[in-house]
Amino acid sequence: MKAAQITAPRTIELVDVPEPQLDGRPGFVKVRLERACLCGSDSPMFAYDLSDFADPGVQRHLEKGPLLPIDTQNPYPLAPGQSIHECLGRVVESSAPDFKEGDLVLALPNSMAGLCEYLVTPAERTIPLPEGVVSKEEILMTQPLGTVIWAFRKLPSVLDLHTVVVGQGPMGLLFTRMLSQMGARTVVGLDKLDYRLEISRQMGATHTVNVDREDSAATVREISEWRMADLVVEVVGHQTGTIEFCLGLVRNGGTMLAFGVPDQTHYDAFPFADFFRQNVALIPSVGPDPQPNFGLARDLIAQKRFDVSPIITHVLPFDNVQKAYEMFVDRKEGAVKVVLDYEK
């Protein structure tokens, strides 16, 4: 079968690899992929020069960060199929009683290795999807929306709160929509890119701020009538600055949700004394339970109660995966959510 493989920094190629098999294992499904989409947590594997990790001065904890375990001395090529994990396809073989040939499913690949024509996943990491009610691209958003739902399960009610979402990429935009629909008094979307701020307004932001041109703290102070935000959601990650930035937007006794994936194991510059004196609650969110969280996300999208369509900006054939990564990582051509179509 065909798979995509990262062979060097910012270089991904199509290769031939053996097709995976069930091999008699009970409780598994084999899926032929039809769609997959890129996520910010996939970007480092493509965009970073992983050879740098051979230098002890830049070593980071790879097992629990956004990067998958690699040979730091000789990282390239990566394993075929890495890195993508938001995948939709059709069951072609099943040893699980709840799935049969022909079922459309959300399939969560092992080791984020979804850049391939076929994959085998356990039934507990496979979610049945409806057909015909929305597009395949929209129902694929079950996976990212499910991670947002998992985060909201950790939060108190957002009804009547002043809220801020730092970062209006795909995940930030889903947070913006969810906060708007759950009754937040204000939803302020912050980003550096005007086209994403325009989509933020489509997703329900009451206010938007370009952080490169406007004073974010002053704007939040004015909107909240000098209280500052009750809840600030950080959806950038991959650097240490935005957590401190969020602390400057949240009120005393407020809440910060850390959703952006960290690269570093330690945030040495974090102003702990300010965090301490403000009595801020800091809540991390990663790794949702697939069945309840993705199941609810699927239903919200399929029932057309949660519109994800504004964030789906590009659909490219699977064999154009190099361009897809470049568009997504470099934010070219107004890219937000970039979907790969395996059927083309």
Image (cartoon, grey):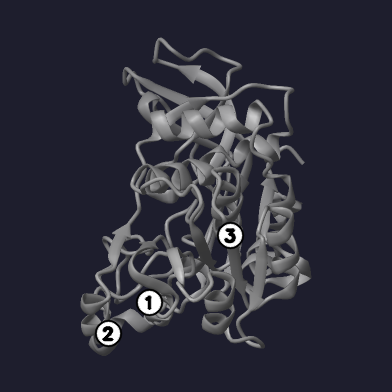
| Residue drawn at point x = 70 percent, y = 68 percent | 197
Q: Secondary structure at mark 2?
A: loop
Check contact, mark 2 vs mark 1: CB within 8 A: yes
Residue 271's label in the rendered image is 2
Q: Quadrant of residue 149?
A: top left
* Observer able to see residue 77: no
Residue 186's label in the rendered image is 3
| Residue type highlighted by circle 3 | Thr
Percent x, y of residue 236: 49, 69
Look at discs 3 and 1 and give the one toward the viewer.
3
Separation (CA) of disc 3 from disc 1: 18 Å
Left or right placement of residue 271 versus residue 316 in this view: left
Percent x, y of residue 130: 63, 21
* Foreground of the two, 203 or 157: 157
Percent x, y of residue 223: 59, 71
The answer to whether residue 306 is above or below residue 27 is below
